[in-house]
């Protein structure tokens, strides 16, 4: 055969064809990335209604791509970066989560005595402590952390404590044998906000030395600094040395509202900090304080709030300078009633206040809706129009092996309407996941390899509306 | 260079049939598994990309790639290999040309097999997607009249259409595609380094006999692992600015293993004690 006689020719053809296919694949991936862009679909109404709003968002695709989208000067824009590097992912990191660590532990100054009185019981150490302190560690979005004492507890009798040996970390900190006998741990908000170069967080209810209010993180340690601190504690220590529950960094109280039963959240609004709280008569109030914690304005938002609900507040992203938005509990109309509050501050004064009941979207663009979630709310430049970005879901129902199943696919509905209410001027579906995120196959988690390369597929994309204005 | 190309072509003549058979078997198993998987109820909601992963096609591709590397040396391990070896050693010219030609052929067949997978994925996208859609369509339930969740209300009697997908989306979602077509230079560099090292190791493998081949195979496997580590470490360095040490370690291991294998193979070739 000819090919047998001239194997070099067929080998060269194979080489050329393979190179061409692989080059085409590489170009295809790069050139087609626009297909991952977010877009506004099914628009209804006047698109010029978007004028005066500022929206920014990021989509982290499991296709190892990062899409950004924005509404600026009435125009929608989107762009996608493939294989985003650490720098490109910085925008995505703005939405990094906050976490808390909570420890009942023996105070450092009592450790020596408690350790000395310890007896071994199997693999555990047992002892008794005169008092325990409750320490909370707050892990901030930038990777730093602060740890502070919340309250100290001394029972009528010494408190039984125990410790166990962890092969890699030595003796674990003393913990209470019966934690039910101790005071309840105060609940926390999983939201922090950045303002004037510092992190702030709302402390929900008064506990121990900490009144309910807004606190500023004055000093936070990096992970390396914390590790060094703990290593120092370990030196020469025999038995539990309190390294996990050590206090470090510093916080200070910015503002504690008078008569506050529960502080619900805080958000910066220009030169002021908006502090949302329930007073002792269940009225919903918003106080605005300056950087020194001085009260500038106090607004009554609702006379009576339904405290039967969990009173959770969603502080919405800050995307317009000088504007803070909250989705608050409302009432007493019943469970799930919500109130949308937007406050705008200019020159140290409140210039706009939107304070109306909010109903989660009960209709979808197709199919049924599944409790939509408000992601962003904003007033336009004049304060007369309201922009809402709500997550809505398409729902499919399946019957598989005799069982009815529902699967969801999320998208966002963007609505512009008069602040006074009425028919929307403009609605559109903000599609952020062009990769058909639906169905059973999409339920599985994204699995990453040892270095962050994908090893498993999940078509759902994570969408974030970051804070971009302090 | 011309001699190396001629030697590679000569080996290709002997490796062509096994390589084509490998490609055919791989294509057949992939089509069969993907179509069968697409027709299963339990795979409703899968897309072409997720089904590819669910049907173990990523490890199948890696196994096929390894087989392609071994098949490239068919002239050295097929029946009559001893005669081939004797003939090789009597050829005029430097002995390292033998290794270079064999390594070049290994690299080329590995590239060809990778390209074949790309072609297959593009070719199978339409039929697999069609079967997936048909399976999903047959299982769409009638809309429920009663809804039990307090937060959910029925507002339409018609279910939304199953969203359409595209070849680009399904290719972009495929982790294998992301690794093989990285959008950052370091990814390409790590991929090329790993690829070249594995190809050269494969090229050397069948110049050894007996225990020598076993040791050479161990070096080859070790190199494959280090190449994978280098590719992952490059991703980690790019995405998270970490794993730099892992990348340098992997590259050092690749270079060391390559140097040992090459020196050893060339030494034995010079002594003419091979095959």
Image: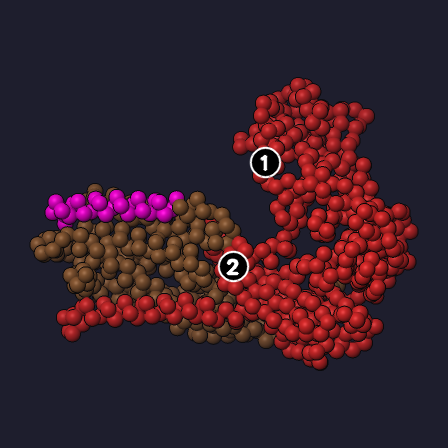
Chain colours: A red, B brown
Tag 2 residue: A84
Subunit ID for the residue under disc 1: A
| Residue at the outermost front position | A347
Which circle marks residue A186 in the picture? none
Q: Which of the 4 quarters of the picture holds residue A299?
A: bottom right
Q: A306 or A3: which is nearer to us?
A: A3
**Which secondary structure, mark 1?**
helix
Label 2, label 1: how many angstroms apart (C-alpha)? Answer: 30 Å
Subunit ID for the residue under disc 2: A
Which circle marks residue A227 in the picture? 1
Q: Residue at x 86, y 50 (%)?
A: A295
Q: B263 or A403: which is nearer to us?
A: B263
**Which secondary structure, mark 2?**
loop
Q: Magenta stretch: give its range.
A: B249-275
Label 2 environment density (alpha carbons within 10 Å; few <14, some 14–19, many ≥20): many
Q: Are marks 2 and 1 on the same chain?
A: yes
Q: Is A453 included in the stretch rendered in magenta?
A: no
Q: Is B271 included in the stretch rendered in magenta?
A: yes
| Residue at the outermost bottom position | A45
Measured as percent of width and height from the top left, residue A40 is found at 63, 74
Q: Earlier in the sequence, mark 2 or mark 1?
A: 2
């Amino acid at each position: 055969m000819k090919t047998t006689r001239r194997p070099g020719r067929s080998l060269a053809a194979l080489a050329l064809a393979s190179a061409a296919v692989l080059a085409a694949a590489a170009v295809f991936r790069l050139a087609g990335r626009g297909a991952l862009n977010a877009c506004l679909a099914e628009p209804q109404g006047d698109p010029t209604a978007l004028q005066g709003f500022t929206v920014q968002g990021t989509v982290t695709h499991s296709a190892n791509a990062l899409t950004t989208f924005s509404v600026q000067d009435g125009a929608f824009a989107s762009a996608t970066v493939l294989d985003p590097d650490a720098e490109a992912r910085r925008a995505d990191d703005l939405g990094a989560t906050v976490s808390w660590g909570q420890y009942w532990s023996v105070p450092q100054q009592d450790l020596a005595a408690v350790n000395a009185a310890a007896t071994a019981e199997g693999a555990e150490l047992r002892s008794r402590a005169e008092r325990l302190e409750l320490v909370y560690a707050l892990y901030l979005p930038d990777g730093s952390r602060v740890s502070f004492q919340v309250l100290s507890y001394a029972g009528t009798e010494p408190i039984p404590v125990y410790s166990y040996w962890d092969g890699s970390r030595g003796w674990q900190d003393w913990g209470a044998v019966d934690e039910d006998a101790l005071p309840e741990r105060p609940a926390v908000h999983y939201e922090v906000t950045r303002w004037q170069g510092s992190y702030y967080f709302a402390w929900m209810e008064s506990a121990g030395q900490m009144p309910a209010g807004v606190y500023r993180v004055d000093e936070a340690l990096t992970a390396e600094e914390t590790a060094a601190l703990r290593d120092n504690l370990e030196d020469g220590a025999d038995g539990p040395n309190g390294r996990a529950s050590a206090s470090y960094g510093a916080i200070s109280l910015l503002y504690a509202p008078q008569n506050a039963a529960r502080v619900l959240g805080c958000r910066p609004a220009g030169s002021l900090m908006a502090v949302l709280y329930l007073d002792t008569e269940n009225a919903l109030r918003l106080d605005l304080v300056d950087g020194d914690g001085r009260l500038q304005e106090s607004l009554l938002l609702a006379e009576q709030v339904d405290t039967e609900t969990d009173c959770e507040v969603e502080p919405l992203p800050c995307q317009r300078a000088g504007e803070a938005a909250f989705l608050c509990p409302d009432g007493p109309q019943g469970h799930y009633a919500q109130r949308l509050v937007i406050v705008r501050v200019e020159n140290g004064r409140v210039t706009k206040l939107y304070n109306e009941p909010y109903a989660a979207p009960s209709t979808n663009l197709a199919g049924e809706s599944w409790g939509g979630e408000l992601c962003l709310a904003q007033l336009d430049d004049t304060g007369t129009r309201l922009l809402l970005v709500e997550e809505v879901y398409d729902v499919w129902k399946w019957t598989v092996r005799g069982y009815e199943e529902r699967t969801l696919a999320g998208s966002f509905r963007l609505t512009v309407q008069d602040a006074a209410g009425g028919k929307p001027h403009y609605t559109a579906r903000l599609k952020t996941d062009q990769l058909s995120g639906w169905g059973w196959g999409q339920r599985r988690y994204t699995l990453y390899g040892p270095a962050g390369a994908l090893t498993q597929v999940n078509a759902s994309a994570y969408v974030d509306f970051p804070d971009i204005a302090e | 260079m011309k001699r190396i190309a001629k030697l590679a072509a000569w080996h290709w003549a002997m490796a062509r049939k096994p390589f084509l058979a490998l490609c055919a078997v791989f294509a057949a198993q992939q089509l069969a598994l993907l179509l069968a998987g697409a027709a299963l109820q339990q795979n409703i909601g899968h897309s072409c990309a997720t089904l590819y992963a669910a049907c173990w096609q990523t490890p199948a591709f890696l196994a096929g790639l390894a087989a392609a590397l071994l098949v490239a040396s068919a002239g050295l391990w097929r029946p009559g290999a001893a005669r081939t070896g004797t003939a090789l050693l009597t050829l005029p010219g430097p002995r390292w040309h033998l290794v270079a030609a064999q390594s070049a052929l290994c690299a080329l067949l590995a590239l060809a097999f990778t390209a074949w997978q790309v072609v297959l994925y593009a070719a199978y996208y339409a039929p697999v997607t069609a079967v997936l859609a048909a399976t999903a369509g047959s299982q769409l339930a009638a809309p429920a009249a009663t809804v039990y969740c307090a937060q959910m209300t029925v507002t339409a009697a018609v279910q939304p259409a199953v969203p359409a997908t595209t070849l680009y989306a399904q290719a972009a979602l495929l982790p294998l595609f992301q690794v093989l077509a990285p959008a950052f230079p370091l990814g390409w560099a790590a991929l090329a380094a790993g690829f070249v090292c594995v190809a050269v190791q494969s090229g050397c493998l069948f110049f050894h006999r007996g225990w020598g081949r076993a040791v050479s195979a161990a070096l080859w496997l070790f190199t494959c692992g280090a190449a994978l580590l280098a590719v992952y470490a490059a991703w980690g360095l790019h995405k998270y600015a970490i794993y730099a040490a892992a990348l340098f370690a992997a590259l050092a291991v690749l270079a060391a293993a390559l140097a040992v294998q090459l020196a050893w193979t060339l030494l034995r070739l010079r002594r003419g004690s091979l095959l």
